[in-house]
Every structure is written in C-alpha cells, then in structure tokens.
Image (cartoon, grey):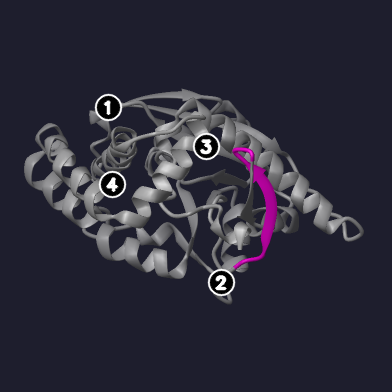
Amino acid sequence: MIRLIKWIALGLGRSPARLFLYPICLSFVVFSQHARRASRQYLELILGRAVGLKEVFRHYHCFAATILDRVFLLTGRDDLLHVDTYGVDVILQRVRKGEGCILLGSHLGSFELLRTLGIALIGLPINVLMYEDHARKLAEVGQSLSANLSDRVIPIGTPDTMLRVKECLDEGELVGILGDRVGNDKIVRCRFLGQPAELPAGPMLLAATLQVPVILCFGLYWGGNRYEIHTELLADRIDISRANRTQDLQRWTQRYVDRLEHYCRLAPYNWFNFYDYWATTKR
C-alpha cells in the first residue's frame, strides 16, 4: 500500500490522489481477511457495539490517508496540512534547558507528523528507535522522498543501540519510540480496552536506565487535511526499583496504556495495529 500510494501521490498531487484511496481501501477490505477481522475486533471494543464493513472501510481509509500525507510530509509539503498543537510547551521547556527527552508514541494516527514537523515546532530533529527490519523497509521506500530519512533512525537490538540513544539524549536531542507493539523484547501485561494485552517492556526499561523525561506524543488525523498533535508529560523520571521491578514496570506501562486508550477513544479510527492484538494473551 505504501509503495502504491507513494507513486500516486508524487504523480498526481494530494487532491487527485485522495480519490484513489477509495478503490485501494476497498480492495483491502475485500482481500485482507486477517486484517479485516482484526479491525472489526478492535472497533467493536472501542465503540462498544457490533460493527460492519462500513466501519472497517473507514478504519482502512483513515490509515491510507495518513500514509498519503506521509509522502507530502517527507517531501516538505506540510503546507498542505492544517495542524493544531496541544501541549508542545512540555517539550519546549525541557529543550530550552538542554534536556534530552524520550518521546513515547504509538501506532495511533501519524507519528511521522511529529517527526517531520519536529524542527519547525521544537527546533530539533527527532531520532526514532525502530526494529531493524522495519528500519530497512522504511529506508527502501522513503529514501527517494527524504535523503536524510534513515540518518535519524536508530535500529533496535544492535550492539550500539543504547550508545547511540545515550549520545542523542546527552546532546539534548529527542528520541522517539512507539510503545504499543511487541517485538523481540520482554513483555508487560496490562489492560487495554477492558481486555488483557501484552505491551513491550523496552520503552520503560530504556527510560529508567537513562533517567530522562518521558513525553507522550500522539498525532491524530481528523479527516480532510486536519491533524492535531497532542503532547503530555508521562514522567520527568521513570523509577523501577530492583525490589519491585515487575510491579513498577507494570505500573508505568499501564499509565502509558491508560493515556493511549484515552486518545483511542477520542479518535477511534486512528489506531493502526491490523492484527489480532489480544491473541498472544489468549493463548
């Protein structure tokens, strides 16, 4: 989908390209059985009622629209978008003191919006922690759009990952990480949308090790060209004691999940984890 939308966007421009989102999304609704089932599962939990293909299509369309706008963000055409910001001062206060921060996001809305507008809003680039396979795919698709895209990506799980993160934070820079999808890291069991779910332990362990502020960031899409960036402080420091490691880790992760759920309920069609999110907990 990303490759196709990139080609259409660069060839036609934003308004004509948006027309192509409808057949693209329709094909995904028809042929992507597992993702369709996962979308319906999530939507029924968040909306509290049975949903049909109309709601699933809307979910796909919201996702596709943010991918389309990612193309324009990466090519410097953010002037096509109307973006309102809320709470950005919580980052600016720490940036002015030269304090490096972890920006903890999710697969809710557009994290790319935060990253590409980081310089304009905050005056600093945003480095992003990403699993190596995802980082490679992003570089393959995005390098033609932004020459320095991969320069600010820090692969997770390499021998120098922690060193690179620490160097960025020591320089007073921002490091972004998404906290709602488990990879190869340890897990924390929390409650999300009233159901038990598994979340990665990595973000909280990283913040606790480096003792830097953790700021939550969500870039919500509201249709058309309208976006909102919401930022809020999770903690100036994450403390996880050796004696109560499991409990402290669960408590901090649940705080993140509670805020993620708040924004999911605010913009329910913005959450883009198209797989059975609760399956691993059920097994």
Q: Quadrant of the N terminus?
A: bottom left
Q: Nearer the viewer, residue 37 or 236?
A: 37
Q: Is residue 258 left or right of residue 117?
A: right
Residue 115 visible in this rendered orientation of the protein: no
Residue 186 lies, with reference to residue 34, above or below; the image says below
Q: Which mark is residue 74?
A: 4
Amino acid type, callout 2: Gly
Label 2 to label 4, Cα distance in Å? 26 Å
**Mark 1 lies on residue:** 225
Q: Position of residue 83 (x, y in %)?
A: 36, 26
Label 3 to label 4, Cα distance in Å? 33 Å
Mark 3 crowd level (few <14, some 14–19, many ≥20, 10 Å Cα): some
Between circles 1 and 4, the one closer to the viewer is 1
**Magenta part of the protein: which range?**
185-194
Instruction: Give the mark nearest the N terminus, 3 or 2.
Output: 3
Mark 2 crowd level (few <14, some 14–19, many ≥20, 10 Å Cα): some
Between circles 3 and 2, the one closer to the viewer is 3
The answer to whether mark 3 and mark 4 are in CB contact below 8 A is no
* Element assignment for label 4: helix
Residue 211 lies, with reference to residue 269, above or below; the image says below
Label 3 to label 2, Cα distance in Å? 33 Å
Q: Nearer the viewer, residue 107 or 23?
A: 23
Amino acid type, callout 4: Leu
* Element assignment for label 3: helix
| Secondary structure mainly formed by the magenta segment | strand
Q: Quadrant of residue 51?
A: top left
Q: Residue at x 46, y 24 (%)?
A: 85
Q: Position of residue 228 (x, y in %)?
A: 42, 27
Q: Nearer the viewer, residue 154 or 93?
A: 154
The answer to whether mark 2 and mark 4 are in CB contact below 8 A is no
Instruction: Give the mark nearest the N terminus, 2 or 4.
Output: 4
**Mark 2 lies on residue:** 157
